[in-house]
Amino acid sequence: MRIMKHPILGPLDEKKEISITVDGKAIKAIKGEPLASALIAAGIMTFRRTRIRKEPRGYFCGIGLCTDCMMMVDGIPNVRTCITPVKEGMTVETQVGLAREEL
Amino acid sequence: MLRTDVAVIGGGVAGLVAAIEASKFGSRVHLIDENARPGGQLFKQIHKFFGSHRHYAGIRGFEIGEKLLEDAEKNGVQTLLNSFVFGIFGKEIGIIENQMSARWLEAKTIILCCGASERMLAFPGWTLPGVMGAGAAQTLINVHRVLPGKRFLMIGSGNVGLVVSYQILQAGAEVVAVIEALPRIGGWGVHASKIRRFGVPILTSHTIKEAHGREKVEAATIVAIDKNWKHVPSSERTLEVDVVCLAIGLKPNIELPLMAGCETMYLEELGGLVPVHDENMETTEEGIYVVGDCAGIEEASTAIESGRLAGVAVAEKLGYLSKDEAYEQKIRIRKILDDLRGGPFGEHRMRAKQRLIQRYKILKGLGNE
């Protein structure tokens, strides 16, 4: 959920909206924000699934350390979405395991 | 290979100040940061800082960030962004740019400002989406203006837990409770009062037992604990929440100092294992310095001063400052650092810092003056 009004930061600026594709569906993102923030704003909390038990994992440390938020981005596996800025037309997929089979 | 006088690794508050200070006296400085822009955790601090004018009292963190970025640029600091340092080999630094290509930077001196990371707590359900660091939630909310949920449970009542709780309220979400394992609130009264005024309960002697949910957090069970840290029978309560924030504390990021061969020492007061350093912030590896939270968890003000100290020290080492000029500056900065470490909380940190310096002398065979 986007915070439109804020007592300290003021109203949300008219920022450039772009479009990315997540598991085949188009979602809106704000230019320059990290991928993780665009996904959470769109209500997506599961970023990847564990290799064997397929448990959901998502945004956790937010500073690129824990690697829990890794996804397939433009065909590249293990991209840390919390520190990767969105780009127009990016293709993002939920990652399963280490996505080795894709390499 | 790219060559420089000073490589500053990590562009948070300590790194920015160190880079500005070193460049001021004529050193060629490269600042490396893995993020798209430097500033570290400053840009998510939307509250006003306390303390003195020198430490930007009354100014909000993100405004300090803007000011430092401007100063760094003015002083000719070269910034390498989206650049992840994967290793230090002697004075050669291996960097991955844009997660794709490798490059090398050879530096005469290195200032490590790797910051800290949040301590986490493991409990059933802690891997569910919706459980996250309080700092991680703070970044989403204050920098990217995204709320990860509507009803938050905050674990930990230190300053991070209290400040982030207040900022969640400011953003328009609910904080169902702040829980604290200790029998008392960890952070400052001023921060605790602010959230209490909103009616948020702060439950001391409580911990989390489990986070529930299939695909993401849907509820959390909390439980009272006695003085032996055992669950009090039948004291469980299940709260309907969709985010659980962990504000357990911070630990220094010492991976790069370790790779560089720096000796470390365990000091609880500074957050755990920290690199041993001397009174110039130089580690046991000559020409490699540590500043900010990776040299021990403290405040933004001490990070600023330790950055200045290392900046002056490298300028001296490289011959841009005479011994006398540097001495004068260093004495002044050390005096400020001592003042900042006054008071009952600061004194523990001051003593721990003194032990680090003692340890440095022992390891270097410098005797004990």
Image (cartoon, coloured by chain):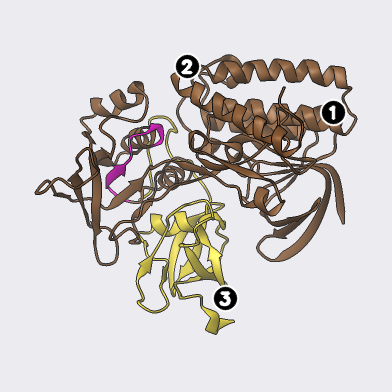
Chain colours: A yellow, B brown
- Quarter of the picture containing the N terminus of chain B is bottom right
Label 1 and label 3 in one chain: no
Residue type highlighted by circle 3 = Gly
Image position of B52 with respect to B258: above or below: above
Q: Earlier in the sequence, mark 2 or mark 1?
A: 1
What is the spatial separation of the Cα atoms under label 2 and label 1, in whole angstroms?
32 Å
Packing grade of label 3 (10 A; few <14, some 14-19, many >=20) is some
Packing grade of label 1 (10 A; few <14, some 14-19, many >=20) is many
Report the front residue among B329 and B226: B226
Image position of B149 with respect to B310: above or below: below
Q: Which residues are magenta?
A: B149-160
Residue displayed at 23% across by 33% down: B200
Residue displayed at 73% across by 29% down: B280
As for residue B249 lying within the magenta part, the answer is: no
Residue at image mark 1 = B316
- Mark seen at residue B343: 2
Chain containing mark 1: B
Residue type highlighted by circle 2 = Gly
Q: Helix, strand, or loop for circle 2?
A: helix
Q: Helix, strand, or loop for circle 1?
A: helix
CB contact under 8 Å: marks 2 and 1 = no
Q: Is B30 left, or right, of B113 in this rendering? A: right
Q: Position of residue B170 (x, y in %)?
A: 34, 34
Label 3 and label 2 in one chain: no
CB contact under 8 Å: marks 3 and 2 = no
Residue at image mark 3 = A75
Q: Position of residue A80 (x, y in %)?
A: 54, 61
Image position of B102 with respect to B120: above or below: below
Chain containing mark 2: B
Q: Is B121 left, or right, of A74 in this rendering? A: left
